[in-house]
Amino acid sequence: MRDLLADIADVGRDPRRGGYSRHGFDRAELELREWFTAEALRRDLAVRTDRNGNLWAWWGSPGADAVVTGSHLDSVPGGGAFDGPLGVTTSLEAVDVLRAKGFTPNRPLAVVVFAEEEGGRFGVPCLGSRLLTGAIDADAARRLTDPDGVTLAEAVADAGLDPARLGRDDEALGTIGRFVELHVEQGRGLVDLGEPVGVADSILAHGRWHFRFTGEGNHAGATLLGDRRDPMLPASALVLAARRIASNVDGSRATVGRLVPNPGGTNVIASTVDVWLDARAADTLRTRVVVDQITAAAAAVAADEGCTVTVNEESYGDTVHFDPALRDDLAGALGGVPALPTGAGHDAGILAAHVPTAMLFVRNPTGVSHAPAEHAEAADCAAGVVALATALERLAG
């Protein structure tokens, strides 16, 4: 299994940020798609690409009530080597394990690679699974743009897909009877419990909001402080408010990971500042409270500075509770492994509203994710392969 990760270790390396930058339908992600297709064909799996750019590798003929596993191959900017690819490589390895023991599935079984799970290029996470399930409007998705102004419609067309066909895919969705996603844990739950593998219990409610603060561009040296309408001030207030307000709402998290001033000169007062807020909490009410209070705090500073602010919700997902019967069945089959909540979103969380869904976690000794220090030991990855193979055998046998 580590050989499979080694095969792609040089794809999408980011020399500036460290780690990997692999985004939906860019050169690195397309190379990884080719790699996955070759590995699937080497295992005599039938590969097809659905209307939304998700890759499916079928063991046997596609059909209803299938057992599906897999994850994604894209990353956040400067992400780690395991988030996404570990779930894909262990899926292929689990097929190898089952075949080696002479197992033949009694129902269709597939490995899927979802497109643009991280939202690192077009801003919306789990884009492939959202399109598949109809959780995002297809016209709105086609209009999404990357930082270079390329629309999703243009990107999928360049990748050989028809952008007019993007949208809910009842045919593909209807094949899924059960979905199991393996993922490196994004946190220290398994480290603290001393366990190599666990199952997921729930996902925090979470979303992304785009704030644009508009002021007046001007000269940094010639403009008196009292004459300024500087949008960087309310943008900075938002960053500080996010930490202060989230710390007062139990279990919530609020993060500003991206801030873009325009025009971006050192000696220029910005005319606009774009800020993206990521907010998460145990339920919708608490998440909305956090976002509303942060918005109010930033808007007050904007008004004092003579600036305006617009807010656009780019994505949102309510709290996900994974299928309890499936969760408990798999936890028992794996010897009573622990069930953990997570603050990270996943394609499994999108599918959970439509089909019985479960997740397996592999221990991350650093507890770090979305960064180059993300890690999983070889022995724990091997335990993940065995756990996933056990789950697939139980569900497809």
Image (cartoon, grey):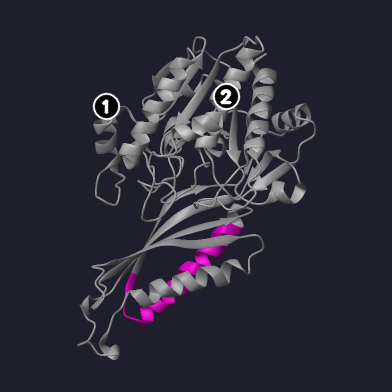
Residue assigned mark 1: 160
**Which sits earlier in the primary sequence, circle 2 or circle 1?**
2
| Residue 305, image quadrant | bottom left
Residue assigned mark 2: 93
Q: Position of residue 376 (x, y in %)?
A: 60, 43
Rendered view: 239 above or below 347: below
> Helix, strand or loop at disc 1?
loop
> Residue 38 magenta-drawn?
no
Amino acid of disc 1: Gly
Residue under the image location 33 percent in, 42 percent down: 140
Can residue 354 be seen in this snapshot? no
**Quadrant where the C terminus lies?**
top right
Q: Position of residue 102 (x, y in %)?
A: 65, 9
The segment highlighted magenta reads 286-308
> Helix, strand or loop at disc 2?
helix
> Residue 292 magenta-drawn?
yes
**Magenta segment main secondary structure:** helix
Residue under the image location 56 percent in, 26 percent down: 91
Rendered view: 224 above or below 84: below
- Determine contact: label 2, label 1, CB under 8 Å: no
Q: Quick one: label 2, few (<14), some, or many (20+) residues within 10 Å?
A: many
Q: Quick one: label 1, few (<14), some, or many (20+) residues within 10 Å?
A: few
Query: Tag on residue 178?
Result: none
| Residue 35, image quadrant | top left
Amino acid of disc 2: Glu
**Quadrant where the N terminus lies?**
top right
Q: Toward the viewer: 76 or 144? A: 76
Rendered view: 395 above or below 375: above
Q: Position of residue 260 (x, y in %)?
A: 33, 64
Cα separation, mark 2 vs mark 1, equals 29 Å
Residue under the image location 70 percent in, 19 percent down: 394
